[in-house]
Image: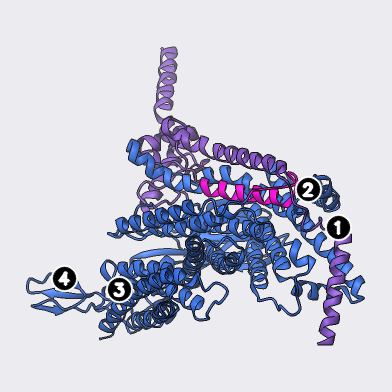
Amino acid sequence: MTERIRLTALITFCMILLFTAPVLAQDDPTVTDDQVNEIASQLYCPICENVPLDVCPSQACADWRELIREYLSQGWTEDQIKAYFAEQYGWNVLSVPPRSGLNWLIYAGPPAIFVGGAAIAVFLIMKGKKEKTPAPAIAPMTAELLEIVEKDLASEDKDDTRT
Amino acid sequence: MIANIGFGLLIISLTVSVVAIILAIYGGVTKSAVMVESSRRASLITFPLLSLALIGLIILLITDRFEYVYVYQTSDALMPLYLKIAAVWGGQEGSLLFWCWLLSGFSFATLIKKDKTNSDLIPWVIAVTSFVTLFFLYLVLFFENPFFRFFVDMQGEVIKSLFQPLYTLQATPDQGLGMNPLLRHIGMVVHPPMLYIGFTGFVIPYAYAIAALIEGRIDSEWIKITRKWTLIAWVFLTIGLVLGSRWAYDVLGWGGYWAWDPVETSALMPWLTGTAFLHSNTGQQKRGIFKHWNVSLIILTFCLVILGTFLTRSGMLSSVHAFSESEIAPLFFGFIAIMLIASAVLLGWRWNLLRSDFSTGSFFSRESLYLFNNLIFISIFLICLVGILFPIFSELVTGQQITVGPPFYEKAAGPLFALLLLIMGVVPLSGWSVKSGKSLGRQLWKPFLVSLLLPLVLIISGVRGWFALLGLWVVFLSVCTTLYDYARSIILHSKRLKISPWRSSVRMTLNNRRRYGGYIVHLGVALMGLGIIGIEFFQTQTQALVRQDESIEIAGYTLTYRGLTIEETTDGREVAVADVQVVKDGREIAALHPAREYFYVSDQAVTRPGVRSTLADDLYVVLADWLPVTSEGATFKVYHNPLVKWLWIGTFVLVFGTLLALFPTDARRVKDTSLAKGVE
């Protein structure tokens, strides 16, 4: 009999633990504002004009930040929370669009622009080197050059003195 | 009465602009000096006419004439005088009138003195500037008129109209809606005008470029005057952009200065192409290269100004800066199309005339480095353009709204900015048409070795983060090369003339303003780079709810919440100010007072951060405004922003350098010396 009571008590305790754990976890004080903001800063307010969620002063955003806190306390990962927001409110809540479909253009575009531009620049320089290069209007900034310059300046000073 | 006069002045201005265009084109085609002179006078008169119209609007604003729709929407009786005046550019209608006024002002400044060197270009300059002014005047008069009033008809319906309709009474609200609280800042008074001056100033280089294309001028004379006006527009645009950043830093309470908001980015685009032109035009002046490129850059820059204005004012962009949706979008679209097509046709027509073979000595010659410099500026511009337009394109094609935020720009453009700084450091030591990199290497090795000391010291001090260290090294290298070149010039100069180095530096700088002004601008950019790297790579932040006398720790600082005072102000605000004690190394170093202001009229709250700013770092404290704040407890968001002050200091240095470069050179003192010829 005592064994049965002990077993029943143990099962009951486990059941209580099982059902109350998520509730207790929701009040988990270990989720800090900084953890919430870390994720909120990567999301945009779904209803405001281009305002990140971590700094948005509206009540709606405050509620969404609390939602992030709640999900963090339930053990959701950063990616899961971002995916949840994207699913609920659309891709425009993400600070950059996901790497899929047409969005690849925005990821491939900048390197392509630079590589394309660099190729044109290299081509022009190679071509420019073959052109008959006129004698330099000026040599590099060497000490000799500066001496010449100073002579010029000195002669100017004489001119000034005369005038 | 004032409004009717204002409206009349706008009508006269519009008519005069049309007359100026017709006379200028006729004078330009027939080479009739009388017609050109008449068009010049017609163009000149627009500025005083629009000045009077603008003064009329200002009078309405400062006398609280809330029967006027614009005054009602942007002002209220409790606002201080400076904000009432700033309300001129606080709304769509007023800011468009302000645009017109600035455009006519630039035309006035260009045409008031007869330009005998470029007299053949003047009729076309008049035609282009008057055409642009005409377009904006048309928008103001027929779509966004700031002189509309409220009337009430027999059914009690409110009507907005310029003149009183039949069977209506004029309606005068007791109070206006007032300016958006976020805009009630001294930065708001200065930032938009600076930006607008910068934007509108690019009309003059554009007008000269179009005029040169029409006249087939391929010499470098017109590019000189274009460079001067570009530099003027560029420095105002730079000031405007930085003031906007400062305003965001002071007011928005998110601890940063630049959010890559689409409107911010669209204002940056003409700055990028304008800066590219300021470098590439030297190639045309010194070596006769980049002729196509320079004309294209000027055209592109002004078209980007109009594109940015269109995107901001059409409601197409999702931005905190955007004006509300307006009917003017198709007109803007048409205007940009006309400008682009006309410019492209002219450029195509003169393509062969402008042909200039790009010849260079090597990859390390100055020509090549300028080419790379322009490549990077244009790459950054294209990245910005993609970032702005892709969300619109994506929505059109897929129906899916997306955001292109800071991570995209930082990853795509960040390394390019570092490359720009590197080239900026190297170019002053390079020579035109040098045949190999050896010469550059000989010039560079000393400052290069010195520059390595900084990352070495930083690594020994425990600073980590390879990208940050690389960025700081590039900044330091550009400072070292610039100072090295300047210092050795001073030493030689002072030895040569047997004068003190100090006197030598002053004389040398004043005699070569363009060159050394440019050096100072580069130093300013390097300092700005230092501030940007500091905040981008080393910023830390924390947020916590603290009770009275509890503390928050960040970056070695201890911030203790001491209490709160709440007071009502006479201009319709409730202001809650927190008292935060800042302690470092056991010593109290500051008392900060972050505040939250609630505006009754607009039912809106804004935060004012408390900031302790030093050359080393900023401590930036915000009262989080979405949570209750009491003397017992409040939520604070605290940012530690290292080196950010150098961003603002660098701007001052940059502006000083630009003004020096702009300051007219005394032709008697500075002849065509080797120095003036070669090293700019």
Estimate the x, y position of residue A90 in percent, counting from the top left. Answer: 36, 38
Front residue of B406 and B40? B40
Q: Are marks 1 and 2 in contact (CB under 8 Å)?
A: no
Mark 1 to mark 3: distance in Å? 61 Å
> What secondary structure is found at the residue carrying circle 2?
helix
Q: Earlier in the sequence, mark 4 or mark 2?
A: 4
Disc number lying in front (1 or 2):
1
Give the quadrant of residue B218: bottom right
Chain coloured purple here: A
Q: Which residues are magenta?
A: B357-382
Dominant SS in magenta: helix
Residue at 42 percent across and 59 percent down: it is B306
Residue B56, above or below B551: below
Q: What residue is disc 4 on?
A: B158
Is residue B636 visible in the rendered image? The answer is no
Q: What residue is disc 3 on?
A: B146
Front residue of A17 and A141? A141
Confirm whether circles 1 and 3 share one chain: no
Chain coloured blue here: B
